[in-house]
Image (spheres, helix red, strand yellow):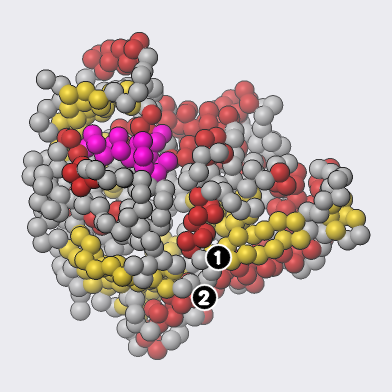
């Protein structure tokens, strides 16, 4: 008998129609699933192409983090969990290969089955899959995890759960999810849901912040915790999946440790002192000048450049448009004009890095700067032309300054836009018709030195417009609390974007984030046009249509003027002890998820 779970009332006709479609196009279970096209790896693959299946086992890698932590549950809104808990101790049904845009292979699940319409997905668990306490991973654990995360977990899990019409046990080791609407990415999204042990949480409040670590089925278990300061993970010698081809050459260290320090500057000093063994340098100027200390000169520390092929993403100062002061796009454009990128880049990076031109720049998913929309992109945008801001269809490019501190041309453009929006200079102070001054706060984390420096340069430029901007720095706990509740005017904003964007885009830019706390829509955007493009992305069966939808979304995001973009690099800079190694073959995503510590190893 099938055990069926209905988590909400659904339209019976919709479910019946989807079930009928499923019956018309039954598919054979496979060892994985790709968003588009076929999987790159066959069922009998030996290892992921960027992993070294012969990598030595043992040793330790030590990371440095700024801030602290006060919870061990990374799956809820409350509290701040340490790095590594989800990554190292918890597994998912499928695992991702980062040498393909978006392809998944069986991990906890030995196979995945769906139909041509992707109206459902069915997973079959591997026999022998076990949690770290020795208990088997069961269908009940899967069903419980999906519902618990979807209803009580972080908002990032809620969207997919709402699209599930039924969740049912179809066999001793099989579970099936049928969907309420068309979403071709949903089988992959569900494949990446963390699977927790139901028994651990019996009688406990899942939403409460706790220092009890979740029990998972992953390669590591939590060994030592010094609250807020340090966490050590040790390899589970009885890890059930150590011989899976997917994991060959992965998770090679005996221990992985994260040490927490007051700010980023202290982390770097700790690296120089040998307290941590790997350090990621985000500033190219510092990469060129700050790595001449003795350990580098002696060869004890190695500098490695890791190129990648992923989009630039967005990085910069985000406007909280929930605040009336930033509600008018002309005001936001004026403040973008006032940001002297060329001066900031020269001051902080010796001018060495390019500016982000759009959210998906540096890839074929990005809209070319300054060019009008055409073809399929124009066709997608035209129904929303009355809602779109200037530049979405005609073309938009960020302002360029002459690099001088005066930045006169751009400040004149900013002044004109501010006047159009009702802001004029009165006695040296920019005010509106009610006589209220234009003033706001830039919120940053202690130790975020580059952004603090960039904000300081920006604040001086804003004074020329009669604007008073105040810089406030707080510790990481306060910062998380304030950003979770959108309690800021402007802050530093980073969203790393992939070569296969999908459902997560709704969490980043969806209207629910305007009022619902804990989403990643920090700017508070509410754009039916953007949501329509995301839906088109999710329903596209042809990659050309998918690319057009992403390019259209890129135009909407960029011309929304929600973020003052700064810089990006197509190469990551990692400094590490000479005993730490990584494969010669790099994934297309480079130094991203799935790279360090997963495929690294220790060798004297």
Query: What's the residue at 62%, 23% (across, down)?
Result: 383
Residue drawn at (16%, 46%) of the image: 45
Q: Is residue 531 above or below residue 577?
A: above
Local SS, label 1? strand
In the rendered image, residue 151 lying in the magenta stretch gets the answer yes
Residue shown at 40%/79% (left/top)? 270
**Where is 544 relative to 430, above or below?**
above
> Which residues are the magenta region?
142-159
Q: Residue 111, can we see it?
A: no
Mostly what secondary structure, the magenta segment? Answer: helix
Residue 600 vs residue 241, the one in the foreground: 241
Q: Kindly identify which numbered label has been placed on residue 286.
A: 2
Q: Tell me residue 159's x, y (percent).
A: 41, 34
* Figure check: 453 above or below 337: below
Q: Residues within 10 Å of mark 2 (few under 14, many from 20)?
A: few
Q: Residue at x 23, y 55 (%)?
A: 89
Answer with left or right where residue 209 lies relative to residue 323.
Answer: left
Q: Is 373 placed left or right of 390 in the picture?
A: left
155 sits left or right of 125 in the view: right
Tell me the tag on residue 474.
1
């Amino acid at each position: 008998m099938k055990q069926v779970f209905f988590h909400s009332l659904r339209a019976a006709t919709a479910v019946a129609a989807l079930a009928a479609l499923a019956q018309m196009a039954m598919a054979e279970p496979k060892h994985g699933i790709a968003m588009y096209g076929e999987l790159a790896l066959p069922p009998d693959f030996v290892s992921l192409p960027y992993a070294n299946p012969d990598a030595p086992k043992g040793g330790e890698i030590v990371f440095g983090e700024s801030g602290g932590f006060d919870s061990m549950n990374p799956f809820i809104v409350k509290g701040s969990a340490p790095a590594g808990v989800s990554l190292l101790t918890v597994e998912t049904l499928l695992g991702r290969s980062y040498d393909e845009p978006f392809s998944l292979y069986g991990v906890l699940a030995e196979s995945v089955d769906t139909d041509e319409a992707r109206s459902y997905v069915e997973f079959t668990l591997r026999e022998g899959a076990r949690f770290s306490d020795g208990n088997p991973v069961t269908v009940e654990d899967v069903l419980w995890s999906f519902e618990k995360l979807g209803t009580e977990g972080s908002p990032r899990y809620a969207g997919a759960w709402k699209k599930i019409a039924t969740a049912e046990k179809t066999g001793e080791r099989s579970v099936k999810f049928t969907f309420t609407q068309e979403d071709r990415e949903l089988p992959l999204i569900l494949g990446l849901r963390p699977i927790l042990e139901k028994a651990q949480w019996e009688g406990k409040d899942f939403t409460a912040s706790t220092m009890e670590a979740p029990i998972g089925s992953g390669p590591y278990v939590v060994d030592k915790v010094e609250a807020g300061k340090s966490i050590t993970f040790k390899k589970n010698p009885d890890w059930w999946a150590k011989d899976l081809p997917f994991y060959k050459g992965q998770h090679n260290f005996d221990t992985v440790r994260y040490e927490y320090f007051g700010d980023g500057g202290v982390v770097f000093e700790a690296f120089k002192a040998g307290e941590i063994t790997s350090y990621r340098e985000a500033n190219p100027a510092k990469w060129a000048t700050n790595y001449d200390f003795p350990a580098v000169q002696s060869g004890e520390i190695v500098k490695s450049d890791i190129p990648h092929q992923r989009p630039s993403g967005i990085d910069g100062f985000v406007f909280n448009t929930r605040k009336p002061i930033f509600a008018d796009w002309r005001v936001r454009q004026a403040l973008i004009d006032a940001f002297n990128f060329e001066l900031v880049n020269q001051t902080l990076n010796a001018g060495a890095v390019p500016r982000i031109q759009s959210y998906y720049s540096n890839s074929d998913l990005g809209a070319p700067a300054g060019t009008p929309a055409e073809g399929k992109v124009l066709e997608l945008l035209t129904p929303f032309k009355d809602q779109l801001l200037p530049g979405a269809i005609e073309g938009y490019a960020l302002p360029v300054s002459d690099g001088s501190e005066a930045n006169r041309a751009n400040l004149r453009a900013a002044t004109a836009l501010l006047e159009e929006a009702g802001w004029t200079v009165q006695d040296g102070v920019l005010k509106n018709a009610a006589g209220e001054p234009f003033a706001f706060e830039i919120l940053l984390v202690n130790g975020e030195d580059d952004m603090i420096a960039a904000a300081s340069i920006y604040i001086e430029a804003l004074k020329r417009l009669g604007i008073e901007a105040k810089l406030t720095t707080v510790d990481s706990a306060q910062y998380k609390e304030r950003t979770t509740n959108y309690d800021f005017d402007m802050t530093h904003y980073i969203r790393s974007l992939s070569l296969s964007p999908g459902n997560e885009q709704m969490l980043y830019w969806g209207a629910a984030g305007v009022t619902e706390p804990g989403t990643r829509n920090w700017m508070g955007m509410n754009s039916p046009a953007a949501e329509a493009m995301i839906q088109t992305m999710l329903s596209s069966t042809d990659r050309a249509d998918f690319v057009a939808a992403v390019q259209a979304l890129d135009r909407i995001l960029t011309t929304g003027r929600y973020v003052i973009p700064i810089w990006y690099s197509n190469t990551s800079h990692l400094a590490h002890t000479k005993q730490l190694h990584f494969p010669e073959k790099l994934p297309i995503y480079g130094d991203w998820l799935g790279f360090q510590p997963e495929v690294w190893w220790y060798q004297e």
